[in-house]
Amino acid sequence: MSLNSILNIANSGMMTAQNQLRVVSDNVANVNTPGYIRKVAEQVSLSTQGAGAGVDVARISLATDRFLQSAGLKAGAEASRQGVKYELYDQIQSLFGDPGGDNGVFSRIDDAFSAFSALSSAATSSPLRQEAIYKASAVFDEASRIATQIQSVRADADSRISTAVKSANDLIQQIEALNVEITRSRATTGDSTGAETNQAALVRQLGDLMDIGVTPRANGGVSIRTGSGVLLAGAGAATLSYRGAGAVNAESTFDDIWVTEPGGQSQSLTDGLKSGEIKGLLELRDVEAPAAAERLGELMTKMADELNRAHNTSTAVPPPSILSGRNVGQSLETALAGFTGTTTVAVVDPTTNAIVARAEIVFSGSTMTINGAAADPTTFLATLNAQLGGAATASFADGKLTIATGTTNGLSIAEAATTPSTKAGRGFSHYFGLNDLVVTDRTSNYDIGLTAASQHGFTAGETLTLRVAAADGERLRDVTVAVPAGAGTVAELLTALNSPVTGVGRYGSFALDSATGAMTFTAAGQSGATVSVAQDNTVQIPSGVSATELFGIGAGVRASRADGFSIRKDIVANPKLLSLAKLDLTAATGAAALGVGDGRGALTLADAGQNNAVFQAGGGSAGGLMSIARYASDLSGDIGARAAAAKTRAESAEAIQTEAEARQSSVEGVNLDEELVNMTTYQQAFNASARLIQAARDMYDTLLGMI
């Protein structure tokens, strides 16, 4: 071996040791830098014609463990998903207040019924009447506030989805730009570790937004795909697009998040999305929050309905001169069909409280008699007006039944003691809302006794677009259903809705409840599919309501009911109009049929909270027959349990993320003891190379001295 060879070997050793010490210096300097990945100088031996020629640093790489990186990305995505769900659901829980407190909606419900109970023994007390009206109003006002705030939480989630999509686009662009830089550095044997470290940090941020898979490229850098295989980076940068909803209400529908791959193909990002902040926001916006709003809407609807049931069986003293009903969403003929039992419309003298005219209506399915005169749904109004003899006039327009005296005389409706009128569990006055205490500006009751043979009242060719979603809120399909031509029956409409080709038949089916006539959707098998309405162009004649409103299709329309209830304005302005007395149909001619101090109606109102009602399934509740108090208690417990479960899931996911990061850091992070050993080793290698140069020099000097 020549002296030049010895010098070259020693020089390569010194240069290699210097590079290795520089790597150690970088590692030690960044020991506390978040996200820093330890550098490794890969040393290789050099040879020439089979003989050793020294050493070199093949490349400086990062101590990355792909398995631990994948585990860390998954843990981070799940922690972000559960964390954001708990953060926002905790806000929803706080809206309902402490179940045991004095200001929450549940305690206000108890206060309202207690106020009516106190009024039953002092029916003439104006302060107690005002207190009862105030307490009842407070319930619906609080429910309206909660419903509005739930939609605000959903709007916040939607806004954060928009922000997350923009952030994801920025991260993808930066990751792809670093791919180019890393590839260029590799091609020129440069140090690409700085770019790789920055890229790893960006990948972690992207992984918090959505579940991704990372694959190293042969020429440097990484390829990134979503959990469902959509290419985001590695062969160009993908582009995500999302248009936020702006104003959000219970019936809002949202656009999908679209991703355009580098090749130009567009598809839904949410297909197959399993975790990440975006997934958590979607679940909260489309599943968790709507479920809470839907159950609140059902609770307020039943409370209003039970109060109205009680109020319609009573009357004010003196009684009002006009009874104006609610929009029943159907024609009078359809609404009257199916009634059974007996009810009486009475005209009462406001001075003597004596009955001056009456019409006893005996229902029998599709026919009836009024004071013994035969009638059917088509002749009902004419026969009723004839039997009232001009003392009062009944009319029907825009889906509302109205009865008015046109004089100072009042109107009162009373049910027969043993055979009260009923349809879908409601008496005549209650069904038409002639003396409601609680009113709303929209259709709220969907259990209105429709049958397969009932006329739906929609025009053939009108359409509604239904959105089918999976249990986690992921959109599966939009289907547009047209109102079929034919006899115009509900059965025909159900057939169109359930068509496996043009309807939702592949995912489940709609059916009418045999007892209440409510239309419900049942998912096929265990799919948990849900149906909402993306667009509805139907208009019912003569009421003007849509099919969505009439049948309550989708959680959105059901949830929207919660913020529409209020106590009748005329009763708020004049508490004397509160119906607390019972009409005595057995009173002798000319004798008072109403008592001024009668408080039996107040007791009926107080008992409304304990009466069993049929709650419809929705929002995670199976519904069923129970009291308002029981349903409110269940809802309170469910909200608390869901919040607690969300907190537990968030804490568990965070703990798993912490463990994954710790394990990853133990491999990829800087260990000062290890770096000290490396530094000592490289220093000794440097010294050895220097000693080799000194030995070569001594040999060279010896050779010169021999000449």
Image (tube, grey):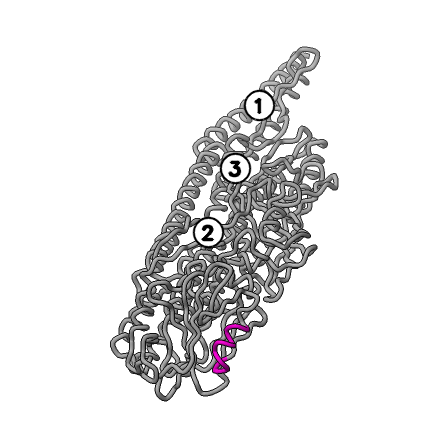
652 above or below 564? above
- Residue 611 horizontal side relative to residue 554, left or right: left
Which label sits in the foreground, 2 or 3?
2
- The quadrant of the image that shows the C terminus is top right
- Residue 221 horizontal side relative to residue 442, left or right: right
What secondary structure prevails in the magenta region?
A: helix
> In terms of depth relative to the viewer, which is nearer, 236 or 240?
240
Q: Earlier in the sequence, mark 1 or mark 3?
A: 3
Q: Position of residue 354 (x, y in %)?
A: 36, 83
The residue that disc 2 covers is 618
* Residue found at the very far right of the displayed protein: 264
Q: CA distance from mark 1 to mark 3?
A: 24 Å
Q: How crowded is the residue under tag 2: few (<14 C-alpha within 10 Å), some, or many (20+)?
A: some
Q: Position of residue 29 (x, y in %)?
A: 51, 41
Mark number, residue 689: 1
Task: Determine if the magenta segment contains residue 385.
Answer: yes
Amino acid bearing label 3: Asn
The residue that disc 3 covers is 27
- Looking at the rendered structure, the secondary structure element under dot 1 is helix
- Looking at the rendered structure, the secondary structure element under dot 2 is loop
Q: Position of residue 436 (x, y in %)?
A: 43, 71
Q: Earlier in the sequence, mark 2 or mark 3?
A: 3
Q: CA distance from mark 2 to mark 3?
A: 57 Å
- The quadrant of the image that shows the N terminus is top right
Q: CA distance from mark 1 to mark 2?
A: 79 Å
Give the residues drawn in magenta, as a range.
382-392
